[in-house]
Image: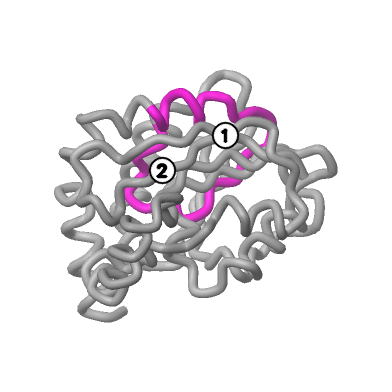
Amino acid sequence: MSVRSRIFAAMYDHQVGRIERAGLREVRKRNVGEASGRVLEIGAGTGANLVHYGPNVTSLTLTDPEQPMLKRLEPRARETAPQATVLRAPAEDLPFDDDSFDTVVSTLVLCGVSDQARSLRELRRVLKPGGKLIFVEHVRSDEPKVARLQDRMNGLNRIVACCECNRPTLDSITAAGFSIDRVEHGTLPKAPKFVRPLIAGVASN
C-alpha cells in the first residue's frame, strides 16, 4: 500500500465534491440508474454510485484495485447496499467467469487503468452476450487546441489525479468490439479545462 494511494483515497471525495455538486451527480444518476440484472462496477472508489442503483439490479459486485479505496468503500456499501459484494481486483484481471454479468458500470475509471485495451477486453469477457457497458468518462477533446493542452498537462494530471486526461476512450470502446447504443458528449462542470470533456452512455457487448 503506497503513500500515494493512501493520500489519493483520503482526498478523493474532497477533490471531486464540487464537481459532483455542480452536475456530475446527475450524470451518474441518469446513467447508473439504467443498470439491471447482475451488475459489476469496476473502480468503485469510495462508492459514489451506490445511491443510484435501482430496483432492477438483482446483484451488485464492486471492485477496486486499491486497498485504501476499499477501506472507504466497504463501510459505505454496508450502509447503502448491504447485499453487495466488494472485492479487490484490477479491471485488467477480473476474477470472474465468462458471461457472468448483465451490466458493467465504469465511471471515471477507464482514464486511470494501466492498460485500457486489456481492461475493455476483460469487460467484454465477463459480460453476457448482449450485456451492457454503462460508462461516464472524461476523454480527449475533439477541439485541437484543448487536445494540445491535455497533452501538455497529462504528465501533471497523472501525478495529481492518477489518470490520463487525453485518452480517446470512446474510440477504445468501439475498437474493443462494443456497439455504442447511446452517447452524450458534455463536460465535467467546475473541472479544469483539460479534464472537462466528458462522454456518458451505454454500449452493448
Residue wearing tag 1:
183
Question: Which residue is rendered at x = 47% and y = 41% of the image?
Answer: 199
Q: What segment is highlighted magenta in the picture?
A: 27-50
49 vs 75, left or right, is right
In the rendered image, which quarter is residue 180 located in? Answer: top right
On the question of residue 130 being in view, the answer is yes
Q: CA distance from mark 2 to mark 1?
A: 10 Å
Q: Nearer the viewer, residue 170 or 163?
A: 170
- Name the amino acid type tagged 2: Leu
Q: Are marks 2 and 1 in contact (CB under 8 Å)?
A: no
Q: Amino acid at mark 1?
A: Val
Residue 70 shows in the view: no
Q: How many marks?
A: 2
Q: Is residue 30 magenta?
A: yes
Query: Label 1 crowding class (10 Å Cα cut-off): few <14, some 14-19, many 20+?
Result: some
Return the x and y of residue 79 as percentages of the image width and height.
34, 34
Q: Which mark is residue 198?
A: 2
